[in-house]
Image: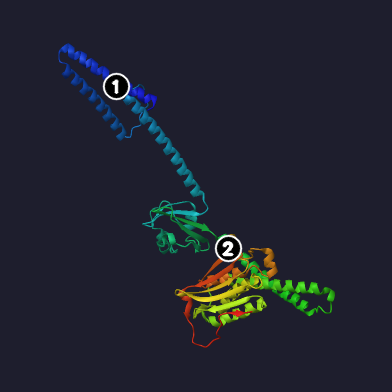
Amino acid sequence: MPHYIRSAWLKTLGELAAVLTLAVIVGLLLGHVWPVVTLAALGVVAWHYWRLRKLLLRLTARERLAPVQGTGVWNELDRLLHRSQAEMRARKRRLLDILRAYRAAAAALPDAVVVVDRNSQRVQWFNKAATSLLGLQYPNDIGAPVGDRMQPLPMSHWLAAGRNAEPMLDAGSPVDPNVRLNLRLIPYSDQYWLLVARDVSKMLRLEQMRRDFVANVSHELRTPLTVVHGYLDMLEPEEFPEWAPMLAEMQKQSQRMTQLVEDLLTLSRLEAQDSLPDESVAMAPMLATLRREAEALSHKRHTIVVQDEAGVDLWGSNKELHSAFSNLVSNAVRYTPVGGTITVRFVREGEGAALSVRDTGYGIPASHLPRITERFYRVSTSRSRESGGTGLGLSIVKHVLNLHQARLEIESEVGHGSTFSVHFGPQRVHPRNDTPHFSLPDSQTA
């Protein structure tokens, strides 16, 4: 117990003792000790109850307690309450300052921020950018249904997904359809959601400019590369033996650059497409073609195993799916040492199907897996140059699969090889045609 509290208690007890002693003396003088002591005790109790009632009334009325002077329990209680009130007011001021700072920061954000009630889907608060990007007006739209105020965006259906709502990556602004928005829903509490809208118009324009630039440059490079490649083919190494190594290197690099240009054009074409024609893709001939391509690229240095266990075909673009599968198989051959095994399996996966390409090559460190499908991303620059890769194969695979609503999964361990699996949903699978086709052996050594 603090010293000042002990002193207050001692003084109060001393005052009580003095009152009772005085009552005993008066009672002795009057000849009625107990009645006088009883009256004195009741007076002390009444006085304490009066102080307690006074304090409760002041607290109920939310009066600010003034600092008091003197000693005693009640004076000390007044001082403690006054200190508690002062500390609480200081905390409130700090909280208000923090709240004002947060609101000022949210108001200054270039992104639109809207607080939405989870149950009613009504607007609770929004910043200044929400007016220019989403068309919300203060104070009219406070408490209004967010779906009604942000037409024609499908807000009600999107909000109904809650925590599972996928970001709207390219939505037109209700204020100006030419302004493209990226919308995200952040459930930051059980009662409220945070709707964040970002203007991505400039970024999309820059991305389109990049695509156009790559497509135009690649297209313009195709003709001069064809000319250079043609003239190099006309030069016979036997006629210029001293130039033979240089001619061979020039032909190799021109072919590599031609392949790079072709891959860039393919990637630009895929990025510009929103969908692909749905045609029946016969998987037995597809797998046979992949086996022949792997054998040709391997030059009998690897064991090629092809397993067709699904017994179904796919809906999609035959050309684009062949491009994606061929990239996976060629990568497996390029990055597998001599004597390794490449296994291609096509199997059922529930109602869907999956095609996997497994190799026994170098493997990919786990830190590189999240970026492995980025264009020009290389795990090992020297190894990629030796294998002749362009760094665009997996990027092409990713875009082809996105257009087929399929996904790519990669499992790899350094020194133990990699497995690239392509998973197709039920909507992409249909029974295999009864037309006779080439039957694949379980394994083939090349």
Seen from the viewer's position, the closer of residues 31 and 189 is: 31
- Name the residue type under label 1: Leu
Residue identifier under label 2 = 369
Q: Answer left or right for 236 relative to 141.
A: right
Determine whether 197 is above or below 86 in the image. below
Residue identifier under label 1 = 13
| Residue at 25 percent of width and 24 percent of height | 47
Seen from the viewer's position, the closer of residues 80 and 379 is: 379
- Name the residue type under label 2: Leu
Residue 98, which numbered label? none
Q: Answer left or right for 411 relative to 44.
A: right
Characterize the local packing of mark 1: few (<14), some (14-19) or many (20 or more) Cα atoms within 10 angstroms: some
Q: Answer left or right for 125 relative to 419.
A: left
Determine whether 6 is above or below 317 in the image. above
> Which residue is the extreme one toward the top?
29
Seen from the viewer's position, the closer of residues 437 and 323 is: 437
Seen from the viewer's position, the closer of residues 208 and 383 is: 383
Q: Quadrant of the C terminus?
A: bottom right
Characterize the local packing of mark 2: few (<14), some (14-19) or many (20 or more) Cα atoms within 10 angstroms: some
The image quadrant of residue 84 is: top left
Tell me the SS state at disc 2. helix
